[in-house]
Image (spheres, rainbow, N blue to C red):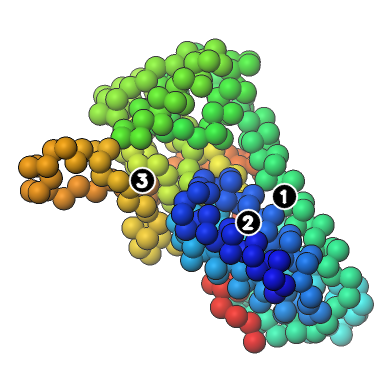
Amino acid sequence: MSKGTNDLVDNLVAKLKRRQLVGSSAVAQATLKLLIVVISKNNWSKANDLLNLVRSVGQKLIEANPTELAIGNIVRRVLHVIREEFRDAEASSTSIENSEFQSAPLTTSSSMYNLLSETGSGDKEYAHASSNLRSDIIQEVRDIRIELDTIYENIKNQATNHIHSNEIIMTIGRSRTVEEFLKMASNKRKFHVLVAETAPSYLGQQMALELSNAGIETTVIPDSAVFAVMSRVNKVILGTHAVLANGGLVAISGTHMMAAAAKHHSIPVVVCTGLYKLSPLYPHDEDSFNVVMNPDAVLGFEEGELMEKVTVTNPYYDYVSPNFVNLFITNQGGHPPSYLYRLIVENYDPNDHTFDPLA
């Protein structure tokens, strides 16, 4: 890797370690911008060389902040693009009958059988040299960047299909995706939004202010009142930090409580999210996706006598089981949790779920 590229990688790693760069959208944009430079500014002749280069950069970024799952998702998307472009380049120069590694492009007809059958495929096929790959790969990666730029537009355009007049909507925290979704719906529908204040960060208050300024009738409720008023709600709309392979959510603390209350009252739960938040990882250890924040917001350090007698934790995220979610609204349309495996097949290669170096 060239010195200039190495400096850019180190700079982004430092920002991630210091949490100067947080949030799935900002992290995804920064990661993709860096990978475009890595692909275009470094010398490589074989797809294997490029795959290993991108994997090594991705591994450094993930280790800098493992809880930002969007980093790994973007790196896997780029690796998938590299593999697909290599296959296309080889297919154009070699007849299908003589090609031992040629596989049909993934389509919407991909099934669980395809997912399992491709998992065992090796990476030795990428050791061959191929020309004209660089420009094709860079163009495809830039297409991913355009997708990231238009995610909010694509999601909010579906708002009027899911929100109807005189409904009572409940949400929690502050999500730009949900905010844009509700604002777009308010152009044609009149509805009422209940926002849980999301203590101790109180991001719900910020969300309520933004919605109110947009002319939406909004009420802030304490987190403790969520269950009490849930019976009056028509729909729960949530944002999320990440979506795991089983359809579970990593979302702001308090989301699990709201989703559980909604299930108890048989209220549909809708999650607005971009596909870049979809991770192929499974929640084998739910706590590994969490971040523990400063407990001062929960119990101040001025309570010195009490602090010595208790242990206070302030988790930033909740894990929400897929059983609590009814629908995901993504930039590619609405999908039930059971459909997510197909989206994973279409966007990620099974060989890239971990970033071990290739032979």
Under mark 3, the amino acid is Tyr
Residue, disc 1: 145
Q: In the rendered view of the protein, which quadrant contains the C terminus?
A: bottom right
Horizontal and vertical percent position of residue 164: 55, 20
Under mark 2, the amino acid is Thr
Bin the neighbour count of mark 2 within 10 Å (Cα to Cα): few under 14, some 14-19, many 20 and up. Answer: many
Q: Earlier in the sequence, mark 2 or mark 3?
A: 2
Horizontal and vertical percent position of residue 22: 50, 47
Please tell me which residue lies in front, 225 or 134.
134
Residue, disc 3: 316
Above or below, 128 against 26 in this view is: below
Q: In the rendered view of the protein, which quadrant contains the N terminus?
A: bottom right
Kindly tell me whether residue 115 is visible in this rendering.
Answer: no
- Residue 106 is left or right of residue 155, and the answer is right
Above or below, 154 against 30 in this view is: above
Q: What element carries label 1?
A: helix
Residue, disc 2: 31
User: Residue 230 falls in which quadrant of the image?
Assistant: top left
- Residue 179 is left or right of residue 264, and the answer is right
- Residue 209 image label: none
Bin the neighbour count of mark 3 within 10 Å (Cα to Cα): few under 14, some 14-19, many 20 and up. Answer: some
Q: Mark 1–mark 3 contact, CB under 8 Å?
A: no
- Whole-angstrom CA distance, mark 1 to mark 2, is 10 Å
- Residue 110 is left or right of residue 320, and the answer is right
Q: Is mark 2 on a helix, strand or loop?
A: helix
Q: Earlier in the sequence, mark 1 or mark 2?
A: 2
Above or below, 313 against 126 in this view is: above
